[in-house]
Image (cartoon, rainbow, N blue to C red):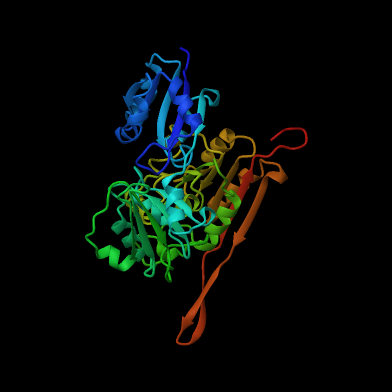
Amino acid sequence: MVTPKIHIIGLGVSESVGLTEQAKAVLSRCDIVIGSPRHLQTLVAFLKTIPIEQVVLPKLGQLRATIDNASAQEIAVIASGDPLYFGIGRWFSKHFSNQDLSFYPAVSSIQAACHRFGLSLQDVSVVSLHGRPLEKIRTKIKSNTTLVVLTDKFSQPQVLARECLAAGFESSTVRVCENLGNSDEKLSSYTAAELALSEDSFDPLHLSIVSVLGKGGILPEFPGFPDTVFDTGALSGKGMISKREVRLAILSFLQPVNGDVIWDIGAGCGGVSVELAYWNEQVGVYAIEYNQQRLEYLATNQHRFGVVGNLEIVNGRAPEALMKLPAANKVFIGGSDGELSSLLEQVWRDLPSNGVLVASAVIEATKQELLAFAQTLDDWQVESVMLSVSRGGLLEKKLRYIDKLPVEVFCFTKICNAAGKT
């Protein structure tokens, strides 16, 4: 099967056709044009002048079949604004070879909205909640930031305002841009407090600009979540999570980077896995836990911090639960249910070159198992730190410290020596 040449043409923010001469020339030689009813209507006058078949854009799950079944040498796909910036262009880049694709960008609604309010594009962060969980916004709401938010029916402006208030940013403002570029364009501005209670309705064709202002302090803004922010079912700061000082050491050893696949085995209530996912949305984190109560708290913490896109909760025991997961290049073992020695051997065997295995221990038996495993490796593959923490606070005007149990954290890195041996 020969793939047709596919041209993805962006339309600017206007209710009338705004095609460049290049885009018009491309459309004129295509056999088929695919677009939403609104986009095809925008081009109706121009399309009447050329012999071209019009096809309404199907759902993405059916789009590949529509193109494969088309009898055409060249196909035009009409998109909004810049197809490769939160547009359909990304889907095409994932499903077709670059040599089969050509892109023709126009001014997007994101650009137009920023220009309406004199905002520099490099100073804003764009968040798409269109077809995505609302909780995702919680990883983006941070002090003194400006968010351009693409929304759907579940993330209307009032909902965004309530998220700002819930995060402690009571001074935030929300500007709503409706029907940009059209004759009925409307720009509105609200404080988060007034919008949260407003019954105003908005055209489906809108986006929101959120200026995050206020004291905040409810959602974390730097690594090292306080233990008290996690739901563990125990007293505040207690329960099945790696404590902050230990968690920071674990995060530092794992050094998550874009594209990593990380397993958190024995995830408990999610202290490590939630922070891993929160600080890097391009990391895929799999939290493996079998205790039903801990799973409930893990899910609560996942949604509380909005890590719903890159953290997957796996209900099961290792090693059986690992069989169906994507291969990991980094692994943390926080709990092993008596299977630590076999888990260490299996995970180490399956890790790729330069893979990282981190494990923590409190009780002496676990420390000895980790030490025994470390002694099977080469010196340059092993690093360890013992953390003895005393936390202090005022009691009757006197500073008193409470000693925490020492925790040993091992980091094993599958690096090669000069001879290429691991």
**Tally of numbered tags:** 0
Q: Where does the image place residue 47, in percent across and percent down from the top left?
A: 36, 26
Determine the residue located farthest toward the right in the rendered image: 418
Residue at 55%, 63% (x, y): give it: 406
Image location (x, y in percent) of residue 385: 63, 57
Residue shown at the point (44%, 50%) measured from the top left: 112
Quadrant of the image occupied by residue 12 = top left
- Does residue 269 appear in the picture of this structure? no
Residue 39 lies left or right of residue 347; in this view the side is left
Quadrant of residue 138 within the rendered picture? bottom left
Residue 216 in the figure: left or right of residue 345: left
Quadrant of the drawing holding the C terminus = top right
Q: Residue furthest bottom?
A: 397
In this rendered view, identify the residue nearer to me: 420 or 130: 130
Asked whether, in this view, residue 407 is left or right of residue 208, the answer is right
Q: Residue 219: give x, y in percent of width and height.
A: 42, 62
In front of the other: 109 or 158: 109
Q: Is residue 266 above or below residue 195?
A: above
Could you tell me if residue 358 is visible in this image?
yes
In the depicted structure, whether residue 142 falls above or below residue 324: below
| Viewer-proximal residue among 9 and 90 | 9
Question: Which residue is at 35% across, 28% downward?
Answer: 61
Q: Position of residue 371 (x, y in %)?
A: 62, 49
